Amino acid sequence: MDNKLQEEILKRRTFAIISHPDAGKTTITEKLLYFGGAIRDAGTVKGKKTGKFATSDWMEIEKQRGISVTSSVMQFDFNDCRINILDTPGHQDFSEDTYRTLMAVDSAVMIVDAAKGIEAQTLKLFKVCRMRGIPIFTFINKLDRQGKEPLELMEELEEVLGIQSYAMNWPIGMGKEFLGIYDRFNHRIEQFRTDEAERFLPLDEEGELAVDNSMKETSYYTQAIEDIMLLNEAGNDFDKDKVLSGDLTPVFFGSALTNFGVQTFLETYLQFAPTPQPRMTDVEEEVNPLNEDFSGFIFKIQANMNPAHRDRIAFVRIVSGKFERGMTVTLARTGKTFKVTQSTQFLADDRETVETAVAGDIIGLYDVGNYQIGDTVVGGKKAFNYEKLPQFTPEMFVKVTAKNVLKSKHFHKGILQLVQEGAIQYYKTLHTEEVILGAVGQLQFEVFEHRMKNEYNVDVRMEPIGSKVARWIENEEEVKESMTGPRSMLVKDRYDHYVFLFENEFATRWFQDKYEHIKLYNLL
C-alpha cells in the first residue's frame, strides 16, 4: 500500500453518539458539525418555533417529535482528521438499528444529562459497546442547568456501568452559577460566557489560577480545586491503552446548547480516539484496514431520504483499502459483480457524489434492490463475508392491510422497501398470505404507518395481535402444520423460513415438552 493511502486511512475517526432520548445528542452533533465548518448556523435544535432542526433529523416524523429514529451519517474535517459521525436513534424502540450502527464504528461518544445521570437507554447501548470492546468517551451535558454533583455523577458512571473513569476537566459551579471548567488535560481554566480573549486562563505549577480573576473569590472555585485535589490523590490514572480497550472512559463536562466545552472535547477526543480498526470475517480471519483490496459491509439501508426521488441508499462501512467510483465490486452473498457508478457521501445536510473513499469512511451506494443488511462488498479477486450483523427477535406484532385494495401494488412495494431497512420484520400466514409485521417497540409501527402514507401514498389498517414469543426452527423439515393451535401460529418470514409465534412463555414451554425433537431458537 502506498504511503499516501496509508496516511489517508490513519486520518479517519469514525464514531457513534449514544444516549438516552433528550440528553442532548442531536444538539452536540450539530455543534461538532459547526466546528468542522460543515454547517454555518448552529441553531437551537429543539426550538420547534424557529424551524431549525439538526441536519441529522431529516425524516418528517423526527422533526414533528424532536427525536432521532434513523441513523444518519455526517462527515467533516477538523485538525487534520476526517471525522465520520453516526448519529444513532435515541429511542429504545430503535435499538436494533443502533446496535447495527455500533458495528460500523471504532469508538463511541456517550452523552449523559447532568441532572438525570445514567438512564435506561444509555445503559443498554453502553453494554453493547462493552461487549464489542469499543472505546467510550463520555460528555456530561447541560452544566448550564442545575444537576447532580459532579463527584456523584463520576461515582454513578463507575458503579452503574462498571467502567473506570478519568475526569479530563471539572465544572466550576453549575446552573446559573456555572463559571467554567477546570481543564486538567490542557492545564488551564476555560471561562463560561466570556470574551474569546479571556476564554482560557493559565494555571500555575500548583494547579491554581496563575492570574488575578474574580472567580478566585467564589466558593465554586474553591470547591472545584478541592475536588481536583481529591481526584489527583484518589482517582484513576489516565491510561491511553485502557481507553482504547474500552476499560476506562475519559469524562468531559460542558453544555452543548450554549456551545461550551464542545470544541475542547473534540480536540482532545481526536488525540486519543482509535484509527480504523480491523474486522473479522465469518471464518474468523481478521481484515486489516491497510489491506490494499477494497472491502466493506452494509449496516443500514434507507429508502426515500430524498422525497423528490424514490431512492434507496445502502450505507457501507469501508473496512479496508480504497473505494473509487466506477470500480467493479463483488457482492459476496450472490457472487454477482457490478460497476459502482452512483455513490454518495454525507456532508452535514448535503449529499454529494463521492469519487474516492478509504477505510473508516461511510459511503452510500444507490440501491435498486440488490443489497441486504449485512452484505459484504469486495473489490479484490477473493470474495468473503464479514461476520453477521445482529437481528433482534420482535416482541410486538400487527396484521397489516391496505385500506384501499386498489393500492395493493403500492402497499406491497412500500412494505418490501421499508422491511429491507431492518426496523420492522415481515411475516406472512401460510395459506392466506396475510401480512404480519413484527417490531421491538410500538414507535416502529407508528413510523411505518406514517411513512407508508407520506412516502407511498397508502393508508394502512393495523390490527394488533399482541406480544408473541417468536421462535425459529433449526430442523424445519420436521415441522408439520398439525403442530399449530390457538396458542401457536406458524408463519413464514421474508426469507421463507418457518417461524412459530407463541402466545406466551408458557405456550412455548408446553410446545417444547410435547415436541421435544423440534429445535427452536430465537434471534438476539
Image: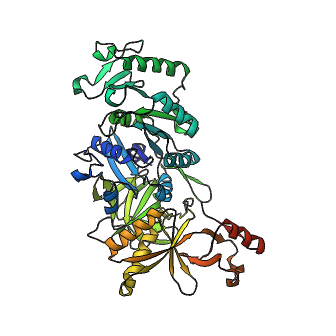
Q: Position of residue 113 (x, y in %)?
A: 42, 40
Left or right: residue 30 versus residue 417 is: left
Identify whether 122 is placed above or below 311: above
Q: Nearer the viewer, residue 47 or 103?
A: 47
Query: Residue drawn at (52%, 67%), measured in percent from left and top?
Result: 332
Q: Where's residue 33, x and y in %?
A: 30, 45
What residue do we see at 27% from left, 43% from top? 34
**Which quarter of the figure is the C terminus placed in?**
bottom right
Q: Is 243 located above or below residue 472 in the figure?
A: above
Can I make out residue 354 in this image? no
**In the displayed structure image, the side of residue 171 where residue 132 appears, left or right:** right
Please determine whether, in this image, residue 177 is positioned above or below residue 35: above
Q: Please provide percent x and percent y for residue 279.
A: 54, 52
> How are the colours assigned in the image?
rainbow
In the image, 242 versus 123, the foreground residue is 123
Q: Is residue 355 left or right of residue 196?
A: right
Q: Residue at x 55, y 70 (%)?
A: 466
- Total labels: the figure holds 0
Q: Is residue 152 above or below residue 2?
A: above
Task: Give residue 91's quadrant in the image.
Answer: bottom left
**Residue 111 image offset from top left, x and y in percent:** 43, 42
Answer whether residue 294 is visible to the viewer in this image: yes
Q: Nearer the viewer, residue 236 or 388?
A: 236
Residue 286 relative to residue 69: left or right:
right
Q: Residue at x 30, y 51 (%)?
A: 54
